[in-house]
Structure formats: C-alpha cells, structure tokens
Image (cartoon, rainbow, N blue to C red):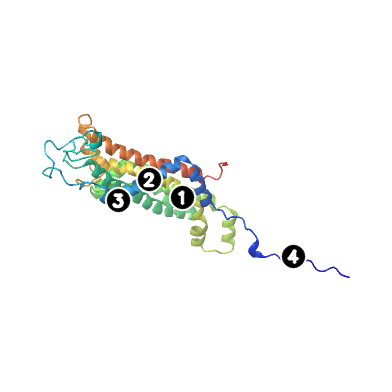
Amino acid sequence: MAAPNAVTKLDANNIEHPRSSSLWIDAARNVRRNRSAVLGLIIIGLLLLIALLAPAIAPYDPIQSMIGQPGHSGQLPRKPPCIHLLGCSVEEPEHLMGLDLNARDVFSRILFGAWNSLRVGITSVGFAIVVGSLLGLVAGYASGLIDNVIMRVMDVLLAFPSLLLAIAIVTVLGPGLENALLAIAIVTIPAYARLARASVLSIKEFDYITAEKTLGAPHHRILFGHILPNALTPLIVQGTLGIGTAVLDAAALSFLGLGAQPPTPEWGAMLSEARNYVFTSPHLVFYPGLAIMITVLGFNLLGDGLRDALDPTLNRF
C-alpha cells in the first residue's frame, strides 16, 4: 500500500520575515547611541523651539526702548541684569539679561535673534546644497567639457577666502540680512559641488550603474534615481557642519555692518553694538557670544555624530 503523500503546506502568512533594515534606519539607531549627536539634537531642538516661540516667550518687544515705559526710571542704557530670585529689588522691573545701549531688553533680543541666525544658517546651506549638488552631479556624470567648465568656475570661487568673497558680494548687493544670506550661500556652493562630483565619479563606475546604461535607462533616471540617493550621505554630514559655519559668517557680516541692520535683533549685530563696552558692561557681549557658541556647538556635535552614524566601515556593537 502506497504511503500517503505527506506534503506539508506552509502558510505564507505565518512565515516570519526578517525585519527590513536600511542605511537610514541603521543611521537613526547609531545616532541614538552617540551621546554627542544626541546632545547636538537636543541643543538644536531647543534653539528651534525658542526661535519659533520667541513672540510668546519674550517678555518685552525686542526693538522697544524701556525709556519712558511704566516702572522704568534712572539710568536705563547698559543696565545690568535684574533677577528677583538673585536679590534684585522687586520694585524694579525684571530684566534677565539687562538692557542694551538703547535700553532694550537683551533677553528678548536674544530670543528673537535665534530666529534670524538660524534662518540665515539653514536657508543659505540648503540653497548651497541644492545648487552645488546639481552642479556636481552634472559635472561628474557628464565629464569632458561640461565637467571642466563647471569645476573651473568652482575653482575660481574657491580661490577667494570665503568671508572676503561674501563681504564683496554684500558690498555690491547692499547691506541687509537677505543679501548676507545670499552671499553666504554663493561662497559655500563650491564645497558641495566638489563633494557631489567626487561621489558621482566613484558611484557611476559601479556594476549596477553600468547595467542600467546597458539596458538603455534614461540619464535622468540614472542620475537622480540611483546616483543621487547614494551620494546624499556626505552631503548631509557636510551640510550639518556647514550650518554652524554659516551662522558664524552671518554674525561676522552683521558685526561688520553688512548683515542685519538696526534695530533688527541679530547676535552678530548685538556684538558689534557693544564691542566698546566689553569691560564696563560685559553682559552686552557675553550673552550674544554665548548664544552663537551654543548654536555652532550644537550643529558641530550633530554633524560629527551623523558622520560616525552614516559611516558603514565602523564596527558597532
């Protein structure tokens, strides 16, 4: 008698599939393990929250002088901080960071300055990444004459010190925060263009790119569907680090009178106004300088953490 057919039917729904993983999921896990990156994320998150909620948090109008306001009397310009919990008389209005040369509340100006500084840093770097990446992708993929023309233009821009070139651009366009933003973006485009080009030159030699070309895939599909996603990692890391540099450049331009114009609250402009009172009224210089330092530190910590998290060559346990 023939043995019955004991074929076991497997239910596909009961099969346990391994959890799908990708570079970005692994990167997120590695960022969570990196204390520096977590600290940087916390700092940047708090700064963004402060910038968005500045109108609700600030106790005073950042451009309004306290001269003539109810409860304010005596010598108001350059008045030191008054904190009731630290012994300041409750009869005096509280100013956590004191008053500036025009008797405006420094704490309120610091809060509103976070929006201006972060806006310049993030927007200028975002613009530079988009334009620079497109130029680098086209140059690396096309090669030949197009590559030579684009990269020689980038070399000319790199031949000038970035801050001096930004000063020259703002001088031509005219002082202002928007023109400073554009100048910072222009001088940082070559760095992202060269980085994108270097990535394209290595990626386009891979076998799967050759296979796509052999199968007749259009160039835009190869460039934006296969090469660009694999070239994003160094651009993201460099962009995160570049935001801190852009904030410093914006503060430098404002310090020189080429960025934010009075009475706009901006940290570099606040430093410029108080530079002659470092010893007599140190609070006017200390708080804007501290805000710039914390912002740059946050982006540098996050950039270093992303660089480690997105590097597949590192062994992690």
Q: Nearer the viewer, mark 1 or mark 4?
A: 4
Q: Are marks 3 and 4 in contact (CB under 8 Å)?
A: no
Q: Are marks 2 and 4 in contact (CB under 8 Å)?
A: no
Q: Amino acid at mark 3?
A: Leu
Residue corresponding to mark 4:
8
The label shown at residue 264 is none
Q: Which label's residue is closer to the chain start, 2 or 3?
A: 2
Q: For the N terminus, give its image quadrant.
A: bottom right
Q: Is residue 145 visible?
A: no
- For the residues labelled 3 and 4, the Cα–Cα distance comes to 63 Å
Q: Which label's residue is closer to the chain start, 2 or 4?
A: 4
Label 4: how many Cα within 10 Å (few below 14, some 14–19, many 20+): few
Label 2: how many Cα within 10 Å (few below 14, some 14–19, many 20+): many
Q: Amino acid at mark 2?
A: Ile
- For the residues labelled 1 and 4, the Cα–Cα distance comes to 53 Å
Please name whichever residue, 144 or 303, is drawn nearer the observer in this view of the structure. Answer: 303
Q: Which label's residue is closer to the chain start, 3 or 1?
A: 3
Numbered disc total: 4
Which element type, helix, strand or loop, lies under badge 2?
Answer: helix
Q: For the C terminus, give its image quadrant.
A: top right
Q: Nearer the viewer, mark 3 or mark 1?
A: 3
Please name whichever residue, 254 or 298, is drawn nearer the observer in this view of the structure. Answer: 298
Q: Position of residue 38 (x, y in %)?
A: 44, 43
Q: Position of residue 105 (x, y in %)?
A: 20, 42
Residue corresponding to mark 3:
53
Label 3: how many Cα within 10 Å (few below 14, some 14–19, many 20+): some
Residue corresponding to mark 1:
196
Kindly identify the residue that appears in the image at 44 percent across and 52 percent down: 136
Label 1: how many Cα within 10 Å (few below 14, some 14–19, many 20+): many
Q: Amino acid at mark 4?
A: Thr
Q: Which label's residue is closer to the chain start, 3 or 4?
A: 4
Residue corresponding to mark 2:
44
